[in-house]
Image (cartoon, rainbow, N blue to C red):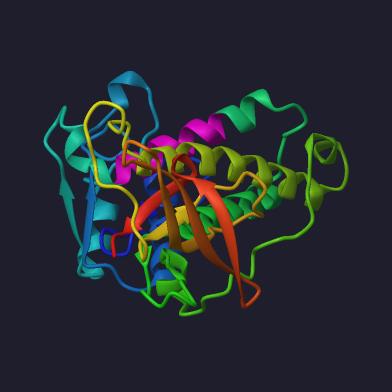
Amino acid sequence: MFTCLTIRAVHIEIVEELSSSAFINALRRFMAIRGPVKLFRSDRGTNFVGSTDNLGINAINVEDSSVKQFLYSQGCTWLFNPPHASHMGGVWERVIGVSRRILDSLLTDVPGTGLTHELLSTFMAEVSAIMNARPLVPLTTDAENPVPLSPSLLLTQKPQQITSVTETFDGKDLFRKEWKRVQALADMFWHRWKAEYLQTLQQRKKWLEPKRNLCEGDVVLVRNKQTARNDWPLGIIHKTFPSSDGLVRKCEVRVVLEEQATLYTRPTAELILLLPC
């Protein structure tokens, strides 16, 4: 899994073995699609550095001569974090941690998920699309058209998600046609990713210390369990309803759906502040 430290985009490559040859092929595929890379960063794990011959483990070895020669020919530099310093890779560790936890549960606990290489490649492409559709910051403060700035928008320069789907899939589709199995797994990943990613955006200190109320003009992300895959509804606070103690617990939000502005009343617990007015 590759992630850009600038736009936070994610790219997943599938390798069939942990060897230097497979690793070089994965790097070549990545660079052929995403373009040349000047700097790679990673932790100093046994999968990337050091010899494991004594343990009988076949591992990717960045310090292998063939890998070194490939990196040198491409003008790449590979930097390692100090040993036992995984916190220094917080940018990629967070993405890897959330996605791997979901993938582990899907591919081991969900029945009927024995995937061929083709199905696994398609599933990983769907996972990458879901992760790259997450909002970073609002692209504009225009109240009539709040469009989220996402890694996929920066990669493709296209605001619309071509991978969004309107059909719903469930567990029964895991035992039907192969393409439906992939879509059912992608939907499961989407629901888990949305639930576990959104909670990292919300601060859990709201009941322990005072914070500012939501105000008119704030750009917020609206939590909605019924949204389709890759749909991140953004809204503008249109009106607030302060309680008797002066705290805002309910707001009226303007959301643009299918080029039509619609007003919804939502509790503040379902709204995530992205950009204060």
Residue drawn at 27 percent across, 31 percent down: 205
Of 254 and 117, the residue lying toward us: 254
Residue drawn at 77 percent across, 44 percent down: 181
Residue 109 is at least partly visible in this image:
yes
Q: Quadrant of the rendered structure where residue 110 is?
A: top right
Read off the magenta span.
92-104
Residue 190: image location, x then y, percent: 60, 46
Of 272 and 199, the residue lying toward us: 272
Of 2 and 116, the residue lying toward us: 2
Residue 43: image location, x then y, percent: 23, 39
Q: Is residue 159 above or below residue 133?
A: below
Residue, far right: 176
Residue drawn at 66 percent across, 63 percent down: 164
Most prominent secondary structure in the magenta stretch? helix
Q: Quadrant of the rendered structure where residue 172 is?
A: top right
Left or right position of 87 against 170: left
Residue 25 is at least partly visible in this image:
no
Left or right position of 91 against 100: left
Residue 96 is one of the magenta-drawn residues: yes
Residue drawn at 43 percent across, 74 percent down: 143
The C terminus - image quarter: bottom left
Residue 84 is one of the magenta-drawn residues: no
